[in-house]
Image (cartoon, coloured by chain):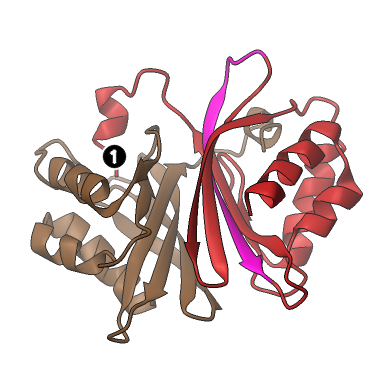
Chain colours: A brown, B red
Amino acid sequence: MLAANALFYAAFSRRDLPAMEALWARAEPVTCIHPGWNALIGRDEVLQSWRAILGNPASPSVESSGESAHVAGDLAWVLCTEAAPDGEVQLVATNLFRREEDGQWRLCHHQAGMLAKATPQAARTLN
Amino acid sequence: MLAANALFYAAFSRRDLPAMEALWARAEPVTCIHPGWNALIGRDEVLQSWRAILGNPASPSVESSGESAHVAGDLAWVLCTEAAPDGEVQLVATNLFRREEDGQWRLCHHQAGMLAKATPQAARTLN
């Protein structure tokens, strides 16, 4: 699923909507939490958000780094850092994949949130 | 796993470390992303963070709301909103559970991130 994770960020950076759609699970459950947003629930709602993001010229491209993969049967999650090319904004993400019937790992949940620049005490006191 | 999710927030609010430790999966993989932090990997590192948080008198208690549960075999994730009792700070969380050999749903991953107060355009332009 590290390969699928790399394809996710490639599709994001290239604004490649067909590739992005192909990466998301065909079967429910499918959910997504963009930074600052409420949770999106259901494949239609999630893909609609990606159409809006990839179609927005102001959306930054995103590079991932520091990937770690964690497998539990037919589900697995990749944790990684996301950064715009200028490195100004850093986020940390959970990408949850499910191995579908055709053997392909596809995204069934994504959450990205801001990474504190210096892990301040204020952030440490929140769970 | 909604019951386990409720126990997680009860343990958090009561600062009940034994209850918190019992809620986390006994077997790896176990990971956690606190708001603003880098990813913590491994049961020892994750539980150490909870000992620090629950032992910190400045840590707020947290109430959850708006839970939705999403099941895929022996894994399931609950999405919910977290808020301190004063409602000033709101977060959105992913709580990933695995059904272990004894039939109990236990946490294997948690990510919480800040919820934007008015979903500003700045947040919408980040993935």
Q: Is residue A60 in sight in this rendering?
A: no
* Left or right: B58, with A43 as reference point: right
Depth order, front residue of B48/A46: A46
How many numbered callouts? 1
Q: Is residue B83 visible?
A: yes
- Mark 1 secondary-structure assignment: loop
Residue A121: quarter of image: top right
Task: Say whether residue B88 is magenta.
Answer: yes
Report in which chain the residue with disc 1 lies: B
Q: Quadrant of residue B29?
A: bottom right
Task: Please name the residue that numbered disc 1 is placed on.
Answer: B126
Q: Position of residue A19 (x, y in %)?
A: 14, 66
Give how far across and how far down residue A82 sits, in percent: 37, 53
Identify whether B6 is placed above or below A23: above
Q: Is residue A14 above or below residue A121?
A: below
Quick check: A65 above or below A125? below
Residue at horizontal 25%, vertical 67%?
A: A26
Q: What residue is at 85 percent from the left and 33 percent from the top?
A: B14
Q: Magenta stretch: give its range.
A: B86-99
